[in-house]
Image (tube, rainbow, N blue to C red):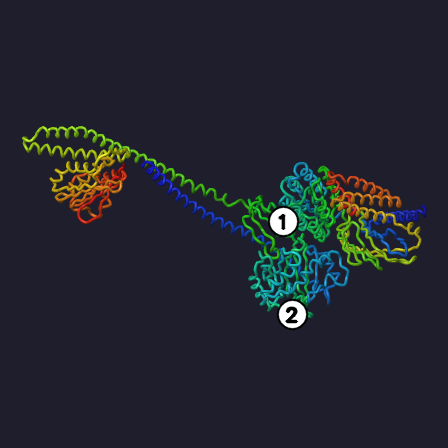
Amino acid sequence: MKYRAALLLILLVLVPLLLLGWLGFRLQQNEQQLVGLQLQKLIEQQLESVDSELQTHFQQLERLLQRQAGALYHLADTDYPVDPLRRFIKDSAQVQQLFVLDSDDQRQFPPRNQALSLDEQRLVERLQPLWQSPGLFHPNASDPSAPAVQLQAPVSAKTSDYFASGQLAQRAPADLPSDFPSELSSDLSAELAEAPSASAKMAESVAEPEAALSDRAQGLSTQAESKPVETATAASGWIAWYADARLMHIYWWRDPQGRTLGFVLNDARLLSDLINRLPDAGQGAQALGDAQIRLLDSQRVTLYSWGDYQSNGQALRSLGLSHPLGSWRLEYHAPALQRAASPGWLAVVAPLLSLGLGLVGLGYLLYREHGRELRLAQQRVNFVNQVSHELKTPLTNVRLYAEMLQQRLDDDADPAVSRYLGVITDESQRLSRLIDNVLSFSRMQRKQLKLAPERLEPDQQIERILHTFAPLLRQRGIEPVFAPGIGQSLNYDPATLEQILNNLLSNCEKYAPDSGELRLHSWLDGTALCVELRDNGPGIDPADRQRIFEPFYRSSSRLTDGVAGTGIGLGLARDLARAHGGDLRLEPGEGGAAFTIRLETTR
Amino acid sequence: MNRYFPIQRWISALLLLLTCVSLTAKAQAPKTQEVRLDLSLATPVMEAGAPQKAFIKISLDGFELPGRAERTPANVAIVLDRSGSMGGEKIRHAREAAIMAIGRLDARDIVSMVAYDSQVEVVVPATRLTDRQPIYSAIRSIRAGGNTALFAGVSKGAAELRKFIDRNRVNRVILLSDGLANVGPQTPAALGRLGQSLAKEGISVTTIGLGLGYNEDLMTQLAGMSDGNHAFVENAADLARIFQYEFGDVLSVVAQDLIIEIRCLNGVRPLRLLGREGEVFGDRVRTRLNQLYSEQEKYLVLEVEVPAQEAGSELELAGVQVDYANLATRQSARLEGRIQARFSASKEEVQQAVDKPALESAVEQVANEYSREAVELRDQGDVEGAKSLLQKSAEFLGAQAEALASPELKAQEEEALQDADKLSSDEEWNRQRKELREKQYKRATQQTY
């Protein structure tokens, strides 16, 4: 009882605390997620702007190379002259090597029928599989399955690492040569907008704006003799390719006669130029604060980094670059998000803590109040107990002397005197039963009830009890009839049986007056001593059947109103029977009340 | 009055005039502001009747600068390693050396300073040298710590140069590093390709390796591909001296963008270009020098195979053409020359005709190639092979030194023997390799310091 109260109070404090804490945590988490998302978005934008900066480099390079290709085309007569091409390579800082394929994709430069330098031989060896892959330099968008087929050819030969071919992701229409047919250029930009941004795929090919354009290009190529460079931008694209553990970038450009010029870029120079487009340490620290952006190649090796934050943990965000740097990534490193949100945590924990303290204080007060009340009740029970004890001694004396007086009076006495004595005896017996009930009840409450079994014949005991009760019952118009059925002595606690019977009989006397016969009979059921009482009174309302055994409950009806009682009788009787290993049951049935007492006996 | 007097006066006046004219003529005579091309054959007379190898020496001489006032303006980026290993004395010496070297420049010049660790910082963006103090204080603020992003450092240095790039300036990155590149590309080949690309823009990279921690292959490749200088400085206190030499070179450039094309004629086949990178297309050899310094000789030695000829015949072996930008006249110029050989049956005649300086150079370069091969062998763990190769080289040098009575070759023989001796020690190998690479580089490029 005591612990339960404490437990309840603890729950009272903890449940709202936990509930609020959980809600606060969820709220915080949501907010954090929101902030995190916003931050991620910001970071992504930052990375994308870096990516587009790098793309700008390729766009500018593309323009430069296109111009140079145009100039080389001007020099070309029927074939591209070897010497100017070699001089071009010698002078170009960005271009490492150059190749020319004729309209059948056959190599024209490096020349087939002249001695090659070592570098040129190496180039030929390396690019042979690329040149042989069909249609790589003739992408055709009308056949979407084509790109996938193209890809396998060069890759399978040596490296399965990386191969991608396509155009730059976003090329502003303004970049197109001004003499480009205008209706085409709008088509083209629409096409390019749809082109995938080449970021992640191992291999992909952004195809050339479709048949219309190639038709146009063919149409133009027939009149190319008269109109040389103006129609030059028929087709071009970027190829990124890993060969011999080096990323090669090739820009190819188709001249109006269908020959392909391929510029193999100097990879170190390309990286150097890209790095030069990125901020240095000072600018990086200014722009990023406590964060760092890293440029990583396909092997996840840092090529360049800027920003102050230095740690090798997981990146907060990483972004694949656009074609032709598709195998490279940008990573954003910064302290984890939790740190940014830590003041928010304090804001949640502080009110929770104060609320918890308040609840604990309140709980403590309640607990103390409850304890005091409990003590008070205990004191009252003790008081009633003591009073009952105190009452018992004089009462015993009253009964003793009344009985002694009755014996002295003999036959010749005034019948009125003997009647008065009878009343005194009856009432004192009733009072002593009442006190017994109260004492038993309080013992039950304190779990101090002890059984005192002895060997007796229950039939005789029941007879005797009935005999004591008989005058009282007859006075109320009830005629007890007992049918004994045990006929042997048993080992049980006679005080228990007496108290149970007393309670049942006095209930009968109180609530079923003038009901005629009260039938009792006893029998032995195995080792159990059973007694049944059945009266012909008004019986018990079915609604009350469950509750009549509860302590202090008194069924209320016209019948019971005006009848005094403590309300502990039936409950006590059942508790006593149960303490004796048996039970007290209200038998179901129409008319009258029937109880069965069942007590377990020992041999 | 004396009537001869006027005649005497006339004569004296005439004499005066003459002396004046001759004086001015004398003053102008050595100022042929043009690079001199010298072609020589180690063996101008060759044995007849059998195919044989020959060495052609193509030598270029920088002319004298007219005066300090007329030197070529410089555009210099100093790229300084400030990784953790540079801490303490090293960075202090490096800062002071840089400041002292910049002290030699003046308002015509442009200077920039880049420092790198894991990241790259442009300490001084490309600026004309009008106000020195802010530059000096920026340089003095450089502190050491972090990794070595060498590639990015050189890239940013080159980017600073590009802001003012001009073919009429000496455009140079001076890289000082003491450690291995460990952020970004780090192979000698990748840095070599960067150097190659920079050379095409007229930028040279001089690499100074400090201490024993740097990668000498990377540093020599970068310098070699861009035709800069290379130096190994073991002690940081020597940095000031090296910077002085380097800036001396920078300030004495007289010609840039020298493109040398050799066309072998009459069935002569080029075999290899000793000591320098070059491209061979069939019978043609192309190479370039980024610059030529005042009063310094740079040369190439080309080994060719000459087909068998009859005795008494003459043969043109090769034609050489050099295009360059003359910084004194600010014009591009072309030099041309041809080289011939005579064939004789007499061995004596062949011996007597030997061109001593040309053969000396050829021998020096051949021995230098041996030394390079020895380093490669040693790298593969073949200590004995490397040793015997160096001994072979020393023998070859000794024989030639005697034949040519050349003290230089004798000295080189001594050096080769010493190198062979020191080869076996493992502790010393790191230092020795750096020394060897430096020596080889200096021999091959005729670096003056």
Q: CA distance from mark 1 to mark 2?
A: 44 Å
Question: Can residue B447 be seen here?
Answer: no
Which one is in front in this view, the residue at disc 1 or the one at disc 2? 1
Q: Chain of mark 2?
A: A
Task: Choose the circle earlier in sequence order: 1 or 2.
Answer: 2
Viewer-proximal residue, A216 or A302?
A302
Q: Position of residue A420 (x, y in %)?
A: 9, 33
Q: Quadrant of the N terminus of chain A?
A: top left
Q: Position of residue B356 (x, y in %)?
A: 87, 48
Q: Position of residue A577 (x, y in %)?
A: 25, 39
Q: Quadrant of the C terminus of chain A?
A: top left
Q: Secondary structure at mark 2?
A: helix
Q: Secondary structure at mark 1?
A: strand
Amino acid type of the residue tagged 1 in the rendering: Leu
For residue A220, which numbered disc appears in the image? 2
Viewer-proximal residue, B391 or B279?
B391
Instruction: Check the image and report above or below for B227 versus B141.
Output: below
Q: Residue furthest front?
A: A488
Quadrant assignment, res B382: top right
Instruction: Check the image and report above or below for A421 versus B197.
Output: above
Name the residue that disc number 1 marks: A303
